[in-house]
Image (cartoon, rainbow, N blue to C red):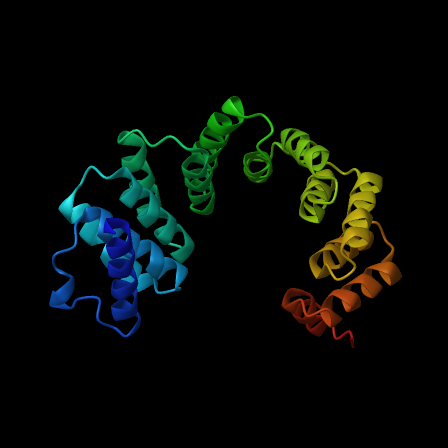
């Protein structure tokens, strides 16, 4: 009966928040755990302001609830406030929350604010505990590429492809790294594979066009750019417009 009452309380809280009553005095008696659950439900309901209010309340009532910092960190991350997300992830780790998602997300947050070495350190921590963690491998490969360490980036993308041979994004990112190393044949082979896996992968066509253009095959390059533009890639559309190419 107690569990049922709790469930009804959470449902009522969610309904109040949906209609814009997150600050209603009828909710003042909730404890930290209840505010945490309300925040989760608001996140699921795609109501970030209400979720943030709830997580703040949970932390205000109990500053040692690691789960509240984790959830608020995830919310800040998906809102693009990477510095604040990092602060919350740091606090959750300080409170002994050590799960993989925290380190992967904190690493990605570091990546998005151009702190690639810190990002790699977080991805390393995940990979050390689980060498088959594909998300960390993929993200570390991107960070290595940003630092110009293309061979290490390729090694990570190789692993991702080994884990999932149908990951078209890994082929495109590996192709980009091969391109930086001047390996034209492997670059084209990887773009081809990405397109084979996803014939509507506009970015793969556009990038393959760049590779063909760099090697003097302007007809194939133009064909790929037109395909990318027709698939809706704005970058390709603007690219063709500047060159006065009709698509």
Task: Quadrant for residue 16, please give it.
Answer: bottom left
Rendered residue at 69%/58% (across/down): 203
Query: Which one is in front, 54 or 4?
Result: 4
Query: Which one is in front, 245 or 20?
Result: 20
Q: In what quadrant of the picture does the C terminus appear?
A: bottom right
Rendered residue at 85%/41% (across/down): 185
Instruction: Note whether 144 is above or below 7 in the view shown.
Output: above
Q: Position of residue 111 (x, y in %)?
A: 47, 42
Q: Say how many tags the image has.
A: 0
- Does 165 sit left or right of 113 as displayed? right
Query: Which one is in front, 26 or 187?
Result: 26
* Extreme residue toward the front, this view: 1
Q: Position of residue 54 (x, y in %)?
A: 24, 56
Q: Position of residue 150 (x, y in %)?
A: 65, 34
Rendered residue at 67%/48% (across/down): 169
Task: Quadrant for residue 45, please give it.
Answer: bottom left
Q: Position of residue 102 (x, y in %)?
A: 40, 38
Rendered residue at 25%/52% (across/down): 1
């Amino acid at each position: 009966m107690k569990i049922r009452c709790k469930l009804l309380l959470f449902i009522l809280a969610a309904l109040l928040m949906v209609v814009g009553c997150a600050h209603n005095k009828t909710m003042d008696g909730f404890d930290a755990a209840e505010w945490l659950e309300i925040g989760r439900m608001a996140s699921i309901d795609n109501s970030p302001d209400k979720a943030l209010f709830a997580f703040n309340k949970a932390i205000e009532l109990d500053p040692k609830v690691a789960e509240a910092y984790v959830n608020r960190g995830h919310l800040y991350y998906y809102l693009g406030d990477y510095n604040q997300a990092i602060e919350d992830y740091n606090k959750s780790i300080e409170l002994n929350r050590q799960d993989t998602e925290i380190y992967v997300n904190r690493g990605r947050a570091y990546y998005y604010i151009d702190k690639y070495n810190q990002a790699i350190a977080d991805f390393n921590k995940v990979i050390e505990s689980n060498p088959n963690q594909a998300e960390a491998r993929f993200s570390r490969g991107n960070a290595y590429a940003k630092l110009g360490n293309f061979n290490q980036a390729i090694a990570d993308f190789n692993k991702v492809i080994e884990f999932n041979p149908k990951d078209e994004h890994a082929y495109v990112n590996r192709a980009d790294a091969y391109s930086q190393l001047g390996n034209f044949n492997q670059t084209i082979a990887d773009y081809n594979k990405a397109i084979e896996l996803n014939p509507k992968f506009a970015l793969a066509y556009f990038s393959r066009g760049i590779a063909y253009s760099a090697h003097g095959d302007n007809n194939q390059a133009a064909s790929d750019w037109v395909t990318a533009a027709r698939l809706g890639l704005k970058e390709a559309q603007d690219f063709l417009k500047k060159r006065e190419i009709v698509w």
